[in-house]
Amino acid sequence: VYRGSVKDFPGFDASQDAEALYNAMKGFGSDKEAILDLITSRSNKQRVEICQAYKSLYGKDLIADLKYELTGKFERLIVSLMRPPAYSDAKEIKDAIAGIGTDEKCLIEILASRTNQEIHNLAAAYKDAYERDLETDIVGDTSGHFKKMLVVLLQGTREEDDVVSEDLVEQDAKDLLEAGELKWGTDEAQFIYILGRRSKQHLRLVFDEYLKISGKPIERSIRGELSGDFEKLMLAVVKCIRSTAEYFAERLYKAMKGLGTRDNTLIRIMVSRSEIDMLDIREVFRTKYEKSLYNMIKEDTSGEYKKALLKLCGGDDDAAGEFFPEAAQVAYRMWELSAVAKVELRGTVQPVGGFNDDGDAQVLRKAMKGLGTDEGAIIEVVTQRSNAQRQQILKAYKAHYGRDLMADLKSELSGSLAKLILGLMLTPAQYDAKQLRKAVEGAGTDESVLIEIMATRNNREIAAINEAYQEAYHKRLEDDLSSDTSGHLKRILVSLALGNRDEGPENLTQAHEDAKKLADVSSNDSSDSLETRFLSILCTRSYPHLRRVFQEFIKMTNHDVEHAIRKRMSGDVRDAFLAIVRSVKNKPAFFADKLYKSMKGAGTDERTLTRIMISRSEIDLLNIRGEFIDLFDKSLHHMIEKDTSGDYRKALLALCGGED
């Protein structure tokens, strides 16, 4: 099936088109609209024929004339469209290595994403256009492992068979693990050989196997083991192997997000993929970024340049709220991986060895006695002890001084630091109970806190929270949730507060039934039973079972369950169900996303930042750090460092642990 957005123009006549372009450029000023309409609605093969017809009719070079008439980004885009794909690639690479400095990102994008045939065509086009050898030029302009991997890719000899040997898959996964994670130093040659030679089909299975045996995705190991341009190249290769469409969707998104637009990247991708997989890229883009590629281009560019890009894009996927097979497959694989990954959850805070509760109590007392407070000493003790150890320090402090450590800390510390340190001194259940209480008390309710806590805690944690709540406030949590929320949100929270989610394995027959229940409701319009049925399944079934339900759901509807929830629900109810789904899919990623949102943009949401850092520090903060860097390409440590200050920052960084 053809997945490009630009097709052959029916009833094409090269001479007629050549004449139309000649007339559009004749005289004073040019008819840019006519030029862009014509060129974007012809296929590349047809454009090449127009160039030939133009030369025979007028004895002039069409590309030279276009360059003369047009300017800026629009010129670059139109001229790129006139070249055959291999010559376009050759020109991009020539530009990337000409002059001072090298545009490594351009080299990486082209060489990591092209097929064997495309690489061979590129090398031939380069020789023809510049009378130089592509490999020699690249070797002269790069170095180290980066150069070696580029040379391997330039051979265009990746295996292409789909026959996969299970034994070799296991062997390759083991070899990669031994070349990186299990070795002091890294054996880069292994990475280069396996990732540069094996077929896509084979490598996808190798990546799955790698996740199974190491508990982490191969990308995370590459980030940890390799560095610089070599690391960027290997990550691009892995992304293209998993899904070329997803790789380009991400490159396009990054080219447009934030301030300024990387026009060269935008032009290169829109031109080079317009006749290959633009439709797939659009689908993945729509799924991943919750907006259509069309809309993003529309918001981010202007004038004729914008019109031409939109024609290459083809259509607007927001218009119909469409969801497509390719995107559904990507979503399905995610659930599959979520089900097999044996992820070992690890916090950043461990019990300290040689612990002496009375000694710590004395250090804290000394830090608070007399004039001024030694915040550093307090941070040092509190962040470097496990919660159980902190509870012992509270007792030792009272036994030694007859004083209440909490009260002393409260009077000595202030602001965000006080909230963080006092929060760490409570037991996890007391802390959660307190956050819930704050969220319901007074005027207005903070539903997002209620949702975050209730949707992510397990039965044991919920039981402990209920107990702590009753003890601290002499009220039942369920009653407070009931009186402070309403409608479906109230029913969801009350159900979760029972802490009686099933804990068994998946049941296939049941999963099929459950998915059908969710899918039926998603299609017909009685909106009341919609939330009710989602509630009865999402709030009661076990996580392993729900993973299976959500896979079945995609099979039945071609939609990810998140998409269905977004489309059919709104407000807090939507957020509550999404929180449950994401928690099932990948809880550390759910928290990584919340942490990122608490710090990005102007201002910092310190309450959320403090709450998550405290409550996850002994459970899965290490995993959250890993997901954070996978999702946002920067480390949690780095972001906290940039976004907070003073002793509060010092304490957060101590909890965060290392820099990834």
Image: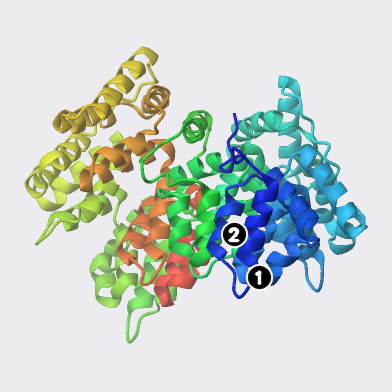
Disc 2/disc 1 C-alpha distance (Å): 11 Å
Instruction: Give the numbered dot on residue 35.
Output: 2
| 394 vs 621, nearest the viewer | 621
Query: Outermost residue toward the left?
Result: 483
- Up-down: is 531 above or below 81? above
Q: Earlier in the sequence, mark 2 or mark 1?
A: 2
Can you see residue 235? no
Instruction: Give the numbered dot on residue 69.
Output: 1
Per the image, label 2 sits on a secondary structure element best described as helix
Asked if residue 316 lies left or right of residue 539, the reply is: right
Asked if disc 2 and disc 1 are in contact, CB closer than 8 Å, the reply is yes
Can you see residue 623? yes
Q: Position of residue 439 (x, y in %)?
A: 18, 56
| 144 vs 259, nearest the viewer | 259
The quadrant in which residue 635 appears is: bottom right
Callout 1 environment at 10 Å: few (<14), some (14 to 19), or many (20+)? some
Residue in view at x 37 percent, y 16 percent: 507
Residue in view at x 25 percent, y 47 percent: 451
Q: Amino acid at mark 2?
A: Ile
Q: Position of residue 480 (x, y in %)?
A: 10, 47
